Amino acid sequence: MTRMTRRRILPLLGLLPGLALMSAHAYAADTMRNMNMSGMNGMTGSAPAQAVPDESYAFTLPEIVVTGYRSESPLTIVTDPRRPRQPIPAADGGGYLKSIPGFSVVRKGGIGGDPMMRGMGGSRMVMQMDGMSMAGGCPNRMDPTATYAFPETYSRIIVNKGPQSVRYGASIAGSVIFERETERFEKPGVRGSVSLMGASNHRFDEIVDVTAGGKEGYARFIQTRNYSQDYKDGDGNRIHSGYGRHSLSGIIGLTPDRDTLFEVAYDSSRGWGKFAHGMMDGSKFDRDSWAVKFERAHMSPVVEKLTLNFNHADIDHLMDNYTFRKGMMGTDVKRRQYGVRVVADLKFSPRTTGAVGIELGQQAHSFAEAHKNKPQSAFTNDMTIKNLGIFLEYNREMRERDRLKTGLRYDHMTDAYHANIFHNPMGMVTRNLIPGKTSDNAVSGFVRWEHRAAKQPLTFYVGLGHAERPADYWESFHTWNFYSNRRTGGTVGPEAHRPKKERNTQLDLGWVYTTETTNASLSLFYSHVKDFILRYPTVGTGMMSRTRYGNVNARLYGFEAELTRSISERWTLGASLAYTRGDDRTNDAALPQIAPLEANLTAKYARGKAEANAVWRLVARQNRFHKGYGSVTGTDSGAAGGFGILSLSLAYRPDTNLTFSLGVDNLFNKTYSEFVNHTELADVAGFSPPSKAHINEPGRTVWFKTNYRF
C-alpha cells in the first residue's frame, strides 16, 4: 500500500471507532437521563415518561442542511428540498439526492445526472413527482426523470430504501418521491417566498413561489430559473457543462371542507444542457404536464382516505452536435405519457391499517431526424409501453411495542416495438429494425417486523422483500437494435434476445435511535438479484456502434450508518458512513457502477441569529471495476482515486422570514472525479482534448444565497 493510499484510507477507517465511541457516549448519556427521569416519576407515582422525538431538532436545519436527515420510520428518509444544502447541489433532482448516504450520481455535465441508490439506478429506483411516474425521452439518458424535477418547488423528498414498499411500484433498489403540498388557508391571505442564489461559473438560481386563497381554496404560482456557464475543475480546465432551465407551475385547489381537496396543476419547463460524456448535447429539454388530484378523508369508518390522481406529460428532447459544436447530426425524441392512480388508505381498527391501490399507465416514444440544414422528418413511433399495477398493504400493531408491515403487488406490462428506420445526414440507412411485441408479469412483496425497546427510544427492524422488473425502454431498445438491425444483418424480432426480467430478493435490518439531542441509525442489507440486467461493452464505433444487455446473477450487500448529536446548545456534530459491494457471480467479476466507501463529517456552530457549518467528505479509492460493463446509467472506465473535500458556510437570519447564507465548496480547489461517472468524450473547440477518463468535478465554488418568506 502506498503512502498516498494510506493517507486516504486511514481517515475513513478511523471513522469506525469514532462512530462507535460517539454512539456509546450518546447512549450512556441518554440512558442516565432516562434513568433519572424514571426515578423522579417513581417518587411522584406517575407513569414513566416516553421518549418523544423533538420535531424541531435540526436534522433538517432551519438554515443550511449539513448534518444529516431524520428517518421518519425504518428505511424511510424525509428531507425538505427548500432548505439550503452544502455543498450546493445541481439544479435538478439528482444533485439533491447525492447528499443522502447511500446515493451517488453519474455525472454527464452540469445537469442530467443519473442518481443511484446502493449501486442501482435507472428504472431499478422508482421515481415519482407529485403522484406522476415520468420517464425522460433520450434513448441515451441525457434526461433521466430527475432532470425534470425542480426540487425547491416540492414540499418534501421521501426516500424508501430497498424493496420494502409496494405503494409506488416494483422498486428493486427503492423509491424516491417528490411531494408537493399546498398548505390550506384558515382565512383569506397571501403567502410566498423568493429565493436567489449566485455562484461561481456565473451560476444563477431564482425561485418565486406565491399562493393566495382562503378557506374555500387557493391559487398558487411558482417560477424557477437556473443558469450556469461551463464549470472549471481544480486545475482550471473547463468542462463542457453549461445549462439553462426555466419552469412555470400553476396550481388551483378547491377545499370545500377540511376533508376534501380538488386540485388541478399545470407544469411547463424549458431547458438546454451541454454534456461532456457524449458526442451530442441536449439543445432542448421541454416538458408540459398537467395533473388532477382528488382527496377525500374519513369517507367511512374503514376508508380513512381516498386519493385519485390523473396526469399527462409531454417530453420533447432534441440532441445534436451542431448547436454547441461543429457537427451535422441531430435527433428529436418525444415521450407522451398518461397515468391514472387510485389509492384507498384503510383503517380497520386502532391497531390495524392498510391500503389498496391500482395504477394504469401508457407511454409512447417517438423520434424524428433533425440534422443540420435539412428539414426535420416526421415523427415515427418506435415503442409503446403499457402498465397495469395493483397493490395491497397490511399493517398490524402486534403488541405494545411490535409492528408487522406487509405488502403485495402485481404488475402487467406490454411493450409494442414499431418498425424503425433512421438515416444519417448523407441519407444512408443506419437503423432498420424489425417490429414485435412482448409482455411480462411481475410480482413484488415484503414483510417487515419492527420492535421498539421498552426503556430506550430505540427501534429495531428486520425485513424481507422481493421485487421483479422487466427490461425497461433503454435496455429493450438497445438490445433490439443490436440483434434485429437489418442494416447490419440482424433478422430476428425484439422478443428473441430481450433480457429476462430481473428478480431481487433482499434482507434489510437495522436500528434507529432518537432523542432530543441524538439521532443515530444503522441500515444493513443483503441482496441477491437473479437475472440482473447487465450492460455489455459497446461493439463498433461511431454511428455503427451498438450496445446490448444480458442477464447475470448478482449479489449486493452493504450498510449506511449515521449519527448526529448536539453536544451543547451551540454545537452539533455529525458523521455518516456508507458502503456497498456488488459481485457479478456469473462472470466472477465486480458488479459495475458501485460507488466506493464514503464518509461525511459535519459540524455546526449556532449562536443567536448566525451559524457556521463545515462538511468534510471523504471517499476511498475504488479498485473494483469491470471495464466496459455497466447499466443504463453508465459503464466502468477504470479505477478512481480517493479524495477528501472540505466545504464551509455561514448563515445569518436577521428575522424569522429572511435568511442570508454564504459558502465555499471544495475549499482547497482539489482536482478529483467520482468513480460512478462517465468517460469524458466531448471534443469541443476551445476545450482541452478529452481525457478519455472520468469527468472531473467542479473546483472551488463560492456561492451566496438569500431567501425571503412572507
Image (tube, helix red, strand yellow):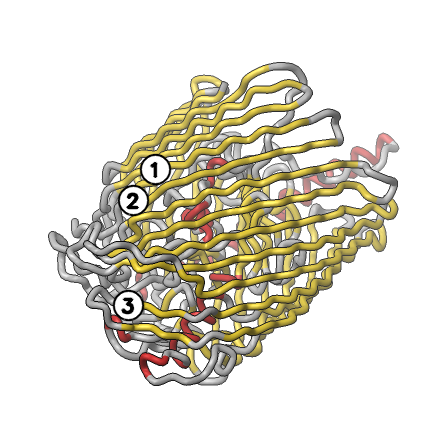
Front residue of 621/633: it is 633
Front residue of 339/356: it is 339
Q: Which mark is residue 148?
A: none
The image position of residue 675, as x and y in percent, is 34, 63
The image position of residue 18, as x and y in percent, is 48, 54
Judged by depth in the image, the label closer to the viewer, 1 or 3, is 3
Residue topped by disc 1: 226
Up the image or down, 565 lies above or below 352; here it is above
Of the residues under marks 1 and 3, which one precedes in the sequence? 1
State the quadrant of the N terminus: bottom left
User: Residue at left 46%, top 59%?
Assistant: 365
Q: Tell me if residue 234 can be seen.
A: no
Residue topped by disc 3: 423
User: Residue at left 24%, top 58%?
Assistant: 371
Residue type highlighted by circle 2: Tyr
Residue type highlighted by circle 3: His
User: Residue at left 31%, top 42%?
Assistant: 665
